Image (tube, helix red, strand yellow):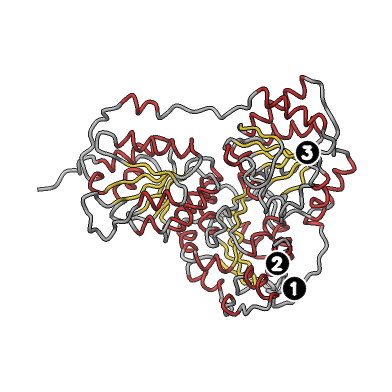
Amino acid sequence: MTAGPPQRSVADAVGEAIAAAGATNAFGVIGSGNLVVTNALCQAGARFHHARHEGAAISMADGYARVSGEVGVCSVHQGPGLTNTITGLAEAVKSHTPVLVLAGEAPAAAQTSNFRIAQDDLVASVGAGVDRVHGPATAGTDARRAYRRAIVERRPIVLMLPIDIQALPSVASLFPAEAALAAVELPPPAPSAAAIATVTDTLIAARLPVILAGRGAVLAGARERLERLGALIGALLATSAPANGLFADLPYALGISGGFASPFAAELLPRADVVLVFGASANQWTTRHGTLLSDHARVVQVDIEPDAIGSHRPIDLALVADAGLAADALSDELERRGHRDAGFRTPELADQIAANGWANDPYEDLSTGDWIDPRTLSRELERRLPANKLVVTDSGHSLGYPAMFLSVPDARSWVFPNGFQAVGLGLGSAIGAAIARPDVPTVAALGDGGTFMALAEIETAVRLGLKLLVCVYDDSAYGAEVHHFGPLGHDVGLVRFPDADLAAIARAAGARAATVRTAADLDVVGAWLSESTAGPLVLDAKVNPTVCAEWLAEAFRSG
């Protein structure tokens, strides 16, 4: 006797609800605790991309969400499947990425299960939200609620899926009204009229204003609205590192503020008498330990999260509001009062800004033939790559080079998984980004340390056929520690490693690969770009290990 199709279960209902809520792509590692729900998600129309490790899967969901603007979905097994996501989960929390994690969970009655841990407490400890499927009658509602929470709360939500409840037959919802509420959108917070009037008074009195925008401005889609405001007050424009690209190609844009600021930008920023901070924390990295903001500058901070305002430095005025709505309200009030000022903006300064970015900054090329200078590597790579590309970094010593030398056309084309400053998240983030934008090449700019942490995912990139360029800044070390502790007289032998042939390892995984020691070795990039077939290219770039990145040297000088 042939068995009929399995009865529709709670797991089926959850997968279907997540797909219906809008999930088109999902990432993860399959185990017994999440196989059925993931199958249901796929059968309802989503595509599933299997990683080799959950730590990379959560980064893939994060990178996908940052580029696509959708909720990133990650599916994992209970217990160790979830614990393996925690570092990437913390990164997504700190970067305000909407991610939904579908996590199996041991049955409440299985007190001696090997998989049992306090999953709620674990997730909450890194700042992610916790939700749960409670039973057959609420499964769809529970899933939709968790998906919506990720959007509204701008952070990861982990939906616990007890495996005993997953297996129960699904039944019709007892709460149809609650299910309907899941589709309601919340408007972003607008500033008060009184606060706008006060800040406008400050802007009218300003002579040399700067607008400094962060990831909050990216999430608000505030580029055009901030440029309108900047034009009215004559402001220079700069971003935090996570918001790189927001003001790409605008004539008065200085690029990144902070450790990655060009020397000319670092000269201009302290001249500001008013600094408008939109959706950025203004932390030590963005202000270069406070040196890029003068003591006499009045600082206005705009953020939708009250706790973020003034958390890193004293401020003079605050607006609790969405960055775009605040910019609109300020511009409207300035126009109502008939105010327009040139501020910093002159044609001469625009020409100087264009001529004095990192691309034109002089340096001594320390390439040797055996090693390529990482600055030369970055400049030559930029010369060979199209303007329309995605760039994804990792953390560590190498992260400044792509930030300084690799251009992006907009902020959604830049992924900077450095909110938690964890090494090893870049390759997974780049895979997710590449899936979000298969129409353009994605560049993963990694250190050798971070590459080895996620090495198995090179096979994932091959299997998925991604147009992904993995450029490894390979100094055979944990370079930040070498350059920090070596000059202080410490033994740094423990953070140096024998030279490894990463190109050979990548080829073994099925990728195209090349070892780069000179600029000429980068000619392989042009050939790869011209190929009609997809597939990753891995560059094992043997960078000169004696070169200390400018941003890192500055950080050491500042303590």
* Mark-to-mark CA distance, 1 and 2: 8 Å
Q: Which mark is residue 367?
A: 1
Q: Is residue 167 left or right of residue 272?
A: left
Residue furthest toward the right? 348
Q: Which mark is residue 374?
A: 2
Q: Mark 3 or mark 1, which has the lower sequence index?
A: 3
Q: Which mark is residue 396?
A: none
Task: Nearest to the eye among marks 3 and 1: give it.
Answer: 3
- Per the image, label 2 sits on a secondary structure element best described as helix
Q: Amino acid at mark 1?
A: Ser
- Residue 342 seen: yes
Q: Amino acid at mark 2?
A: Pro
Q: Are marks 3 and 1 in contact (CB under 8 Å)?
A: no
- Per the image, label 1 sits on a secondary structure element best described as loop
Q: Decide: is 109 above or below 496.
A: above
Q: Mark 1 or mark 2, which has the lower sequence index?
A: 1
- Residue 20 % position (x, y): 38, 35
- What residue is drawn where x is 62% and y is 53%? 391
Graded by Cα atoms within 10 Å as few (under 14), some (14 to 19) or many (20 or more), the crowding at tag 1 reads many
Q: Which residue is mark 3?
A: 274
Where is residue 318, by image quadrant? top right
* Mark-to-mark CA distance, 3 and 1: 42 Å
- Residue 254 % position (x, y): 77, 47
- Residue 244 seen: no
- What residue is drawn where x is 54% and y is 66%? 451
Where is residue 220, by image quadrant? top right
Towards the viewer: 362 or 524: 362
In this rendering, the count of numbered labels is 3
